[in-house]
Image (cartoon, rainbow, N blue to C red):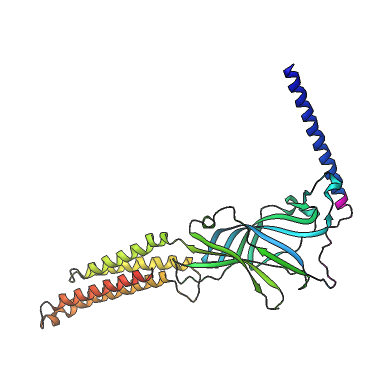
């Protein structure tokens, strides 16, 4: 008897659920038919005859993640997601007339979408085609959809502090189709799904992000800038270039001033060091933009190279002048070589420390 009661109760609840779903689908179908019976997505909602106030498009960032930076091209690639929201009075209804339905989801291609343009961009790729995107519509006429894309934008970079450099780059959003006063974009920074510091990549650490407006040259149109500030993680360059270059120079200077009579060894040490520094310069030249500001790391390598040339010159000249110096003092050549070695080591250390100041 108990089993029969449980089975009967289950069937009643199941049938009620089926009836509820069927009723919802019928109401939703009726709502869709009523909304889009005379709706034309090719006709916009922007008032072009003396509007009292501009038509508002609200945009909010859903994701703003750094993907990669190509310094030589001064380009930055972001994963950039936007939530667009606007009002379409043709899509308003009373929920009580349709079983309490207060929002529905429809293909984006079926509704009018305001124009939005990303400028200063060299490449844009959407993850989904427009036919696969859906908009959600509320009974008050509010329409929204989520747009996810990869955007590559131009960003002028000051690499003087390389590899301890920091940059601020932006994705710039504007409209072109409407007259000033007819349309306005209100841009906001949305809540990121992950902490900001995790939105960089292996080489770059995200510091902050925000939104600001900039007036265009016509003094009427506003450019909306989604800005991101990030700094480079310098550990790779410090570990594999800066520290080895410093110690190679320091040891080479010591080797050059040890046993000054062995000229052949001096040439080998000096040329090996010069070739190493030249190789580093070639790597930096390929990776960095050709701007007027020479990076600190390049200056560091150039100074290392200059110090090595100076040390090599001193190591080769001192033996030649030794016979003349001995006439005045037998220890004078050794003292001069030690003084020069210490001065070059001090200059090498200062060149190293300046990178971190």
Splitting the image into 4 quarters, where does residue 26 fall? top right
Give whichever of 300, 28 is nearer the camera. Answer: 28
- Residue 106 part of the magenta-drawn span: no
Give whichever of 241, 48 is nearer the camera. Answer: 48
- Residue 36 part of the magenta-drawn span: yes
> Left of 350 or right of it: where is 50?
right
> Left of 276 or right of it: where is 173?
right
Magenta portion: prevailing SS class: loop
> Left of 247 or right of it: where is 44?
right
> What residue appears at the point 72 percent right and 54 percent down from the top-left corner?
145
The span shown in magenta is: 34-49
Q: Is residue 272 visible?
A: no
Splitting the image into 4 quarters, where does residue 76 fall? bottom right
- Is 269 rendered above or below residue 135? below
Give whichever of 173, 190 is nearer the camera. Answer: 190
Q: Position of residue 242 (x, y in %)?
A: 37, 64
Q: Is residue 343 visible?
A: yes
- Is 13 rendered above or below residue 167? above
> What residue appears at the point 66 percent right and 53 percent down from the top-left corner?
127
Question: In what quadrant of the picture does the N terminus appear?
Answer: top right
> What residue appears at the point 54 percent right and 63 percent down from the top-left corner?
208
């Amino acid at each position: 008897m108990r089993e029969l009661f449980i089975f009967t109760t289950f069937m009643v609840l199941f049938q009620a659920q089926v009836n509820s779903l069927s009723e919802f689908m019928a109401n939703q179908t009726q709502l869709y038919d009523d909304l889009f019976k005379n709706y034309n997505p090719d006709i916009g909602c922007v008032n072009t005859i003396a509007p009292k106030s501009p038509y508002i498009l609200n945009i909010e960032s859903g994701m703003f993640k750094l993907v990669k930076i190509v310094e030589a091209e001064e380009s930055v690639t972001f994963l950039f997601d936007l939530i667009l929201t606007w009002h379409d009075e043709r899509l308003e209804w009373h929920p009580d007339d349709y079983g309490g339905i207060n929002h529905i989801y429809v293909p984006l291609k079926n509704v009018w979408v305001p124009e939005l343009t990303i400028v200063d961009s060299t490449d844009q790729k959407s993850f989904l085609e427009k036919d696969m995107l859906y908009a959600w519509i509320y009974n008050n006429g509010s329409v929204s959809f989520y747009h996810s894309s990869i955007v590559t934008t131009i960003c002028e970079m000051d690499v003087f502090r390389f590899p301890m450099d920091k940059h601020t780059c932006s994705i710039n959003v504007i409209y072109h189709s409407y007259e000033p006063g007819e349309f306005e974009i209100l841009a906001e920074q949305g809540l990121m799904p992950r902490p900001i510091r995790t939105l960089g990549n292996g080489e770059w650490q995200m510091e902050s992000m925000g939104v600001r407006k900039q007036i265009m040259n016509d003094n009427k149109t506003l450019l909306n800038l989604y800005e991101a500030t990030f700094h480079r993680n310098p550990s790779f360059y410090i570990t594999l270039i800066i520290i080895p270059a410093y110690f190679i120079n320091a040891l080479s200077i010591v080797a050059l001033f040890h046993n000054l009579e062995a000229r052949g060894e001096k040439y080998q040490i000096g040329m090996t060091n010069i070739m190493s520094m030249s190789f580093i310069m070639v790597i930096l030249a390929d990776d960095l933009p050709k701007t007027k500001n020479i990076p600190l790391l390049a200056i560091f390598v150039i100074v290392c190279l200059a110090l090595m040339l100076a040390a090599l010159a001193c190591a080769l000249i001192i033996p030649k002048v030794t016979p003349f110096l001995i006439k005045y003092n037998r220890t004078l050549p050794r003292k001069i070589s030690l003084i020069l070695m210490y001065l070059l080591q001090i200059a090498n250390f200062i060149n190293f420390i300046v990178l971190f100041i």
